[in-house]
Amino acid sequence: MAITMTKLMNMSPTMSSSSSSSSLTSTPAPAPTVLPVRTIPGSYGWPLLGPISDRLDYFWFQGPETFFRKRIEKYKSTVFRTNMPPTFPLFLNVNPNVIAVLDCKSFSHLFDMDLVEKSNVLVGDFMPSVKYTGDIRVCAYLDTSEEHHTKVKNFALDTLKRSSKVWVSEFLANLEVMWNTLEENISSSGSASYLVPLQKCLFNFLTKSIIGADPAKSQKISESGYLMIDKWLAFQLLPTLNISYLQPLPEIFLHSFTYPFLLVKGDYEALYEFVEKEGQEMVQRGQTEFGLTKQETIHNLLFILGFNAYGGFSIFFQSLISTIGSDTELQGKLRQEVKEKLGSTAPSYESVKNLDLVWSVVYETLRLNPPVPLQYARARKDFQLNSHDSIFEVKKGELLCGYQTLVMRDPQVFNDPENFVSDRFMKETGLLNYLYWSNGPQTGSPAESNKQCAAKDYVVLTAVLFVAYVFQRYNSFTYSSSAITAVEKA
Ligand code: HEM
């Protein structure tokens, strides 16, 4: 077992309540060791030159993973100072200075809302223009101390609860359309790129479940709603997105300035009008039950639908499909479990509960490929930050930056951390305390008092339903670079 008692005892106090249920902590633990206080290593470099050199390393010469790994090696520390893009020359009002936190223990400080605040730091010190969200700071940019966060987070949680009546049926119905399309394309062209059918499936299912509106009611939205959201997301996030090919063109044209909202204004207004007209029940509920204005309700619903849900699932399902699609042995095991435990019973909340390997594979995919790899939070006050081996002094106002892709490979917590171990979460259930993809432990509960993803449980369940559906329908499928090239029906 990878986690020793001493290591668990030394985890941050932020882990206390959820960690205590871990099966790994059931025996008395030895007293925690006293850690040395260290100055945070690393530097921000010369003004202008330091940030631009770090930006070029991050996007071009090294890429995000090597960028962080090289600095861990250089400073012999998982906590250090560095710069994060976007930076100079045209981001003069963005401060790129951060403290990187790259192990499970230091990263968990990002969840302690007494120590950190999350106002406007969703993607770092840089914040896309509020024009993209109707001049409103939507939920994900609000700190827990703001009254509006309480209102909107509770609205989001309530929306999900209400959507649960149709969540599974809508998802399965749209999955059927997706796989029918893929089969037709394989028959006609020998191969089927899955991105567009997947995004159409996600857009339809999420719009019906979250907004309570049927995209089919508007020809424009049903044909290109998913594309409108893709563009809206891309223009907001371009300065922060890693694009590894065709360098230096991305550095010059995509990472050097912000893109005006004007480029997607027409699309966003069409989506707004659609929600206003077809999602009346939800729009009304936001106003009467949660005290939001009509505009606040619609812009928040659009952000939850487009950014949180559609954006998150689009990334996550691509890694789920490629992970399972590239491993025929794993497909055999999943098929066997689904056949034995589910048979021909339709996948539902209840019927998928005992698919232990499927759940473990979903968790392991989230561990190795966290869909939202970067998380930020600002120190609310001066405090001491612990890594596994040291204590560091953090000053009020400093920005912490966690890169989950490395945090989720913390060798102090995970055995064989770099490799995909399909049954990892079947063998060690206590590990769910250290699965952080949702900006909180998988054992935590999203609430108004924290910034954990409102759909923490829905996301995992939806992925389990996806795998169960696929292996009820097929014995196997063949995957090759973003395409399905063959399916063998069950
Ligand atoms: C695979 C899909 C998803 C992923 C990977 C994901 C991931 C995340 C992450 C990492 C955060 C925290 C961001 C931060 O503060 O740094 C977050 C917040 C949030 N997510 Fe999700 N999410 C997904 C799906 C959804 C869905 C389906 C919904 C709702 C229907 C949702 C609603 C929210 C909301 C409302 C917040 C803001 C929480 C707050 O401000 O307190 N997410 N999500």
Image (cartoon, rainbow, N blue to C red):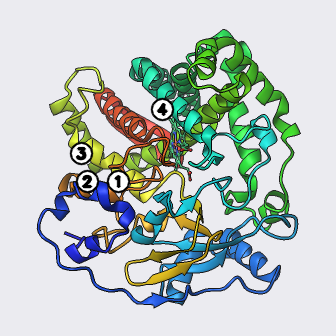
Q: Is residue 22 above or below residue 486?
A: below
Name which of mark 1 and mark 4 comes first in the sequence: 4
CA–CA distance between discs 1 and 4? 25 Å
The quarter of the rendered structure image containing the N terminus is: bottom left
Q: Is residue 133 above or below residue 127?
A: above
* Residue 435 visible, this orientation: yes
Badges 2 and 3: C-beta atoms under 8 Å apart? no
Ligand 1 within 8 angstroms of badge 3 C-beta: no
The quarter of the rendered structure image containing the C terminus is: top left
Expressed as whole percent of the image width and height from the top left, the position of residue 289 reads: 56, 21
Q: Secondary structure at mark 4?
A: helix
CA–CA distance between discs 3 and 4? 28 Å
Find disc 4 in the rendering and name its residue.
157
What residue is rendered at 75% in x and 62% in y? 246
What residue is rendered at 35% in x and 31% in y? 465
Find disc 2 in the rendering and name its residue.
425
Q: Secondary structure at mark 2?
A: helix
Find disc 3 in the rendering and name its residue.
357
Of circles 2 and 3, the one toward us is: 2
Badges 2 and 1: C-beta atoms under 8 Å apart? yes
Name which of mark 1 and mark 3 comes first in the sequence: 3
Specify few, some or many for label 3: CA neighbours under 10 Å numbering under 14, 14-19, or 20 or more. Answer: many
Find disc 1 in the rendering and name its residue.
364
As drawn, which residue projects farthest toward the top? 217
Q: Secondary structure at mark 3?
A: helix
Q: Amino acid at mark 2?
A: Phe
Specify few, some or many for label 4: CA neighbours under 10 Å numbering under 14, 14-19, or 20 or more. Answer: some
